[in-house]
Image: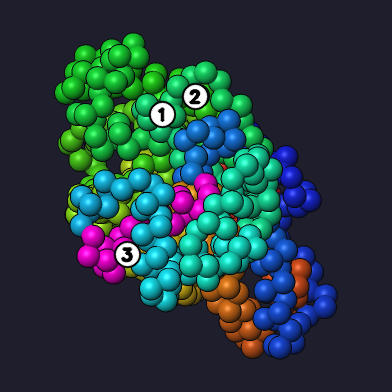
Amino acid sequence: MPSMRCDILLPKVQHSMSSPPANKGSLSADEIGPAVSEEMQAVPFIDVHTHLFMPSLGKVGLWGIDELVTYHYLEAEIFRFSPITPNQYWALTKREQADLIWRTLFVENEPLSEATRGVVATMAALGLDPSASTLQEARAYFEGRPLDRHIRHVFRLAGISEAVMTNDPLDPAEAPLWEQGAAPDPQFHAALRLDRILNRWREHWEALVAKGYRVERDLGGVTLSEVRRFIADWCRRMNPVYMACSLPDTFAFPEHSVRGRLLAEAVLPLCREHDLPLSLMIGVRYQVNPAIRLAGDGSGKADLRAVEHLCVQHPENRFLISVLSRENQHELCVYARKFSSLLPFGCWWFLNNPSVVEEVTRERIEMLGASFIPQHSDARVLEQVIYKWRNTRRTLAPILSNAYRLLAEDGRPVTRAGIKHGIERMFRTNFEGWLAPRKEHASAVSI
Ligand code: FIX
Ligand code: ZN
């Protein structure tokens, strides 16, 4: 069972899954909002899903102004504002792409979207001028910044103590760095990402053969035990806190398919053997517009009976679930009330906008109390955590304040300690407790 490397650089915050402290010092209705905002600022959050990388994987990590401005969310937007075609855009250099996006979305037009405003907020937080007509000043700021020190600075600005990475054992750029012994980092945790195996087996099975695993295209012979060996080898190498996969809106389980068999006979057993949760992010319509590459994925409503069947048929497994369709959110809450092995997390991707985050978080609190994880950043570029977590705090503080005000109105005194406990639970200890062996917690329950 991987130890959650928690020797964080921020003041150690002692957590426990204990009950809220006694109700001394109850707050008035007017004091609740400020107390929530202050505690949201004070508690260092854990970012449970990102595409960031620890310093020893630095060459695959993205950071700096050109990466911020060419984020695929902004690439989707440039084609709406500029006559440039995708082929013309992809022929530009990264710097030329960034200059075009900056000029079009930030100079010639007001950056009103969540993603463009995020760049503005990030630049302002770093002391850069978001009204600049060019990226010259910003580029000079990033040039020569030592990455390790920059990471710590950015995490402090974002108010996060740790981030969970997305680590793909079949990524030709990343895998060799792990095989050469990438140094771990206390502010980063690995997540073993399995999309190439579960979703694209026919394209990647030969990569396992090349690494000495006796697998076959149609899962014959000893394929499934060899896939289990491959996953076990990478668990030893990465020490992941969970395994993960994104899934299409058409995902079904059980399913007599390559993915259905690999999931049931390789991934789920290994999760149980290593006592690791499985994170499933469901609802992607991959490459609805391939011309715009990473920006070309869409969203679709999934049939969440697949989640129901997973929880019923594999009760020993723990599932971190995020769904991409707004229409799936309410039923995900209902399923979380049916299965304690299901932990909903985040307002993912196209849902990470205030108008949706407000609705989703309200229905989660109403149905689940504080027993869910409200948000993750999904940051692909290091500095994005600054705006994504700033926006999360700004959007959710009123939502949480409203929940506590209702509690006070209904007769239960609300204290700052109780508010802090709830925030710590949603943004830290739900996740930490999910990683600790559940059986340990079960034995700890006093009857
Ligand atoms: O599958 C995932 O981890 C998704 O989050 C990404 O593929 C997606 O491109 C993204 O970054 C969304 O925010
Ligand atoms: Zn992601």
The quarter of the displayed image where residue 56 is located: top right
Give the residue drawn at x 69%, y 43%: 149
Estimate the x, y position of residue 36 in percent, counting from the top left. Answer: 68, 74
Given contact means CB atoms under 8 Å apart, are the residues at marks 3 and 1 in contact? no
Determine which residue is flagged by label 3.
77
Farthest-out residue, right: 24
Q: What's the CA distance linking mark 1 and mark 2?
A: 8 Å
Mark 3 or 2, closer to the camera: 3
Asked if labels 2 and 1 touch by Cβ distance under 8 angstroms, the answer is yes
**Residue 407 seen in render:** no
Q: Label 2, secondary structure: give it.
A: helix
> Which badge, 3 or 2, is on the more N-terminal residue?
3
The range drawn in magenta is 63-84
Q: Nearer the viewer, residue 350 or 67?
A: 67
The residue nearer to you, when weighing 377 against 198, is 377
Q: Is residue 208 above or below residue 163?
A: above
Which label sits on residue 177? 2
Q: Amino acid at mark 2?
A: Leu
Q: Is residue 262 a member of the stretch shown in magenta? A: no
Q: Report which residue position mark 1 lands on.
A: 173
> For numbered disc 3, what is the local secondary structure?
helix
Task: Report x, y in % for residue 205.
Answer: 25, 23
Q: CA distance from mark 3 to mark 1?
A: 28 Å
